[in-house]
Image: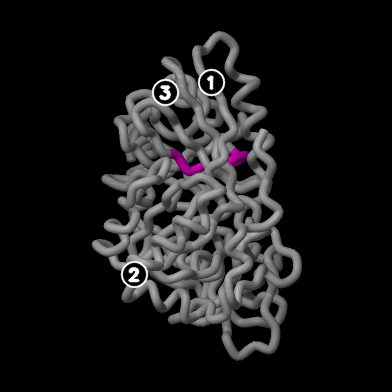
Amino acid sequence: MVDVLNSSPLLQRPGAAEFAGTTPLDAKGVAWHYGEPLGEQRAMDTQPVIIDRSQRRIIAVAGPDAPEFLNNLLSQKLDDAPSGFAASALDLDAQGRILHHADVFYDGATFYLDLPAAQYETFTAFLRKMVFWSDVTITDTDLAILTLIGPADATEALASMDGTAFSRRVSPWTAHARFDIAVERDRIEEVVDTLVERGAALGGLMAFTAERVRAGEPELGADCDEKTIPHEAPRLINRGDRIAAVHLEKGCYRGQETVARVENIGRSPRLMVMLQLDGSAPTEPEIGATIRAGGRAVGTLGTVVHDADYGPIALARLKRSALNAGTAVDLDIDGVSARIDPDSLPTDEGEKAGRKAQQRLRGN
């Protein structure tokens, strides 16, 4: 088994600094910034920025039965995935609650699944336990993820460089394009140097995290709890041409009943939204803090990060009842004022076909 790196070699670069203090974010062992965190994010407007995400672990699943094997276990439709397919996928428990969240790439022969280091061992153990008679091989890899974010054409050109195990586009993202590339761990510095020579800049995980919050993409350890179901985070659901983590028209897998029930009949009791926090507050609330409206607890704070344009922003799990008053409701998080970003509210949560059928049966 490949040992997790204690720290990335890029932490030796000038200005590199790890996240200060403790955090549930998957941030251990890589640079949080390289001295200019807001400038590193702002550079994405004009050039590709390289984010070291080598703290993530990558597993390879191959063999004749690999597509069907993974399709039967995960929320994404993978049994007919074409070569070059990129998406993400969830492992749910029997009640539909999220256990693991992996990004996926298929090269026509092998599925590569990467996820935070803290989830890797339990996810790998689950896959191996479920092999039974399937003709699959499950292998720990010595690959690392580097993410490129920036203007679409320039970023895609760099992500297409030779010598990578795979390159995938993550779309939709923010106004910037995002590509993830996988490289051998012992080539991280070599690849980064080549990318910089070709016009990229180095940025820290803080810049990536600000983009992730803007995109509404949760990180399991920071933004979800043991009760979180997929529909609480609208970005996780496939809709239209958007390939996310949950395919709504695939065969049975563990937890599908909850997904189908919420999609066709009900709504999730909570919803993940982006908050804009008061930047003049002397302190910053921590992940897990209680969110209140009118003195009543209405949610829980997730990832908090400073954004180059918006100042302090955060993801939050809010009760749907808290959204009834609209996005102008005043929120309080340990003395810090916050407002819901209206653009983070979902515009499409499905047609609720089951609910319509019930109404027709009742004559409504």
Kind of element beneath mark 2 = loop
> What residue is shown with label 1?
137
Given this view, does label 2 or label 1 mark the residue nearer the observer? 2
Label 3, residues with CA under 10 Å away: few <14, some 14-19, many ≥20: many
- Assign the magenta stretch its main secondary structure: strand
Provide residue 319's location: percent of width, then percent of height.
Answer: 58, 59
Looking at the image, residue 164 sits to the left or right of residue 298; the answer is: left
State the residue at coordinates (37%, 67%): 197
Front in this rendered view, residue 133 or 245: 133
Q: Which mark is residue 67?
A: 3
Looking at the image, residue 282 sits to the left or right of residue 53; the answer is: right
Looking at the rendered image, the quarter that the N terminus falls into is: top right
What amino acid is found at the position of numbered circle 2 in the picture? Gly
Label 2, residues with CA under 10 Å away: few <14, some 14-19, many ≥20: few
Taking the magenta stretch, the answer to whether it contains residue 99 is yes
> What residue is shown with label 2?
199
Kind of element beneath mark 1 = strand
Q: Earlier in the sequence, mark 2 or mark 1?
A: 1
Q: Earlier in the sequence, mark 2 or mark 3?
A: 3
Looking at the rendered image, the quarter that the C terminus falls into is: top left
Can I make out residue 62 in this image? yes
The segment highlighted magenta reads: 97-104
State the residue at coordinates (37%, 58%): 178
